[in-house]
Image (cartoon, rainbow, N blue to C red):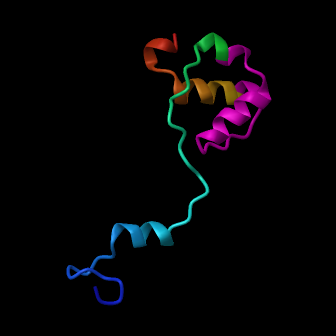
Amino acid sequence: MMNGLRPNGHRSHQQQQEKQSCSFQMPLHYPRYKKSDYESMPEWKLDCLLSQYGLSVSGDISHKRNFAMGAFLWPSQNS
């Protein structure tokens, strides 16, 4: 390898990973809350849940609840 490049001109996957830095890591599991859970969830818990998925939502608690339900509930669960 010349200058860290493969013969095809690309860097190896390991070298690319070493150079990338990211503070966000997607959680392994999708949230398993029901609509009723979101409707009664305290604001601090909504904020924590949304931030775990890299979502920053401003607004009142009603707006955050609606956003979370739209993001995490399947359409059949949302009615």
Q: Is residue 36 above or below residue 42?
A: above
Who is closer to the viewer here, 1 or 52?
1
Residue 62 location in percent, x, y?
Answer: 72, 24
Q: Tell me the chief SS of the magenta region.
A: helix
Q: Classify residue 47 as left or right of residue 54.
A: right
- Quarter of the image with the N terminus is bottom left
Q: Classify residue 63 as left or right of residue 17.
A: right
Identify the residue at horizontal 20%, vertical 79% (top origin): 8
Instruction: Please give the range of residues in magenta.
Output: 38-62
Q: Residue furthest bottom?
A: 2
In reply to whether residue 53 is colored magenta, the answer given is yes
Identify the residue at horizontal 64%, vertical 36% (top origin): 50
Residue 10 location in percent, x, y?
Answer: 29, 76
Residue 39 in which image quadrant: top right
Who is closer to the viewer here, 66 or 45?
45
In reply to whether residue 45 is colored magenta, the answer given is yes
